[in-house]
């Protein structure tokens, strides 16, 4: 059970690392805006961001990967507790 929890926590951290590649999308937006300044790319992104923050102000502050890492770390911790109980009992 501990190994399952540790595997889950590491997997979540890896997904977070992969998600951080969104900086590539940012660079592409900048390049597209440079190529054609008439495209309202940044204005649209800002408007969408404001709408999203107004709808999900509290949830927007919570990082999804942190929730997943927490639950998998909890599973690993419970596995450790159960292992100790099994060895002592």
Image (cartoon, helix red, strand yellow):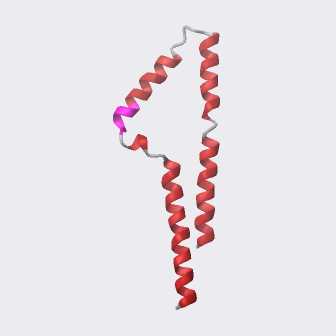
Taking 42 as reference, is 83 above or below it?
A: below
Q: Is 54 a magenta residue?
A: yes
Q: Which residues are magenta?
A: 52-57
Above or below 79: residue 39: above
Q: Nearer the viewer, residue 32 or 79?
A: 79
Q: Quadrant of the N terminus?
A: bottom right
Q: Residue at x 63, y 24 (%)?
A: 27
The image quarter in which residue 23 lies = top right
Where does residue 77 sit, x and y in percent of width and height?
Answer: 53, 70
Residue 47 pos. (x, y %): 42, 22
Residue at x-position 44% and y-position 46%:
62
Q: Main secondary structure of the magenta part?
A: helix
Residue found at x 51% / y 18%:
42
Picture coordinates of residue 67 (x, y %)? 48, 54
Q: Residue at x 44, y 28 (%)?
A: 49
- Toward which corner of the image does residue 37 lie, by quadrant? top right
Asked if the magenta segment contains residue 40, the reply would be no
Vertical placement of 23 versus 65: above or below?
Answer: above
């Amino acid at each position: 059970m501990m190994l399952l929890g540790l595997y889950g926590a590491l997997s979540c951290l890896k997904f977070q690392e992969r998600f951080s590649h969104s900086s590539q999308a940012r660079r592409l937006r900048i390049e597209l805006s440079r190529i054609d300044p008439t495209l309202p790319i940044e204005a649209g992104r800002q408007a969408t961001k404001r709408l999203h923050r107004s709808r999900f102000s509290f949830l927007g502050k919570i990082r999804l990967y942190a929730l997943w890492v927490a639950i998998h770390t909890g599973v690993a911790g419970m596995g450790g507790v159960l292992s100790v109980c099994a060895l002592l009992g």
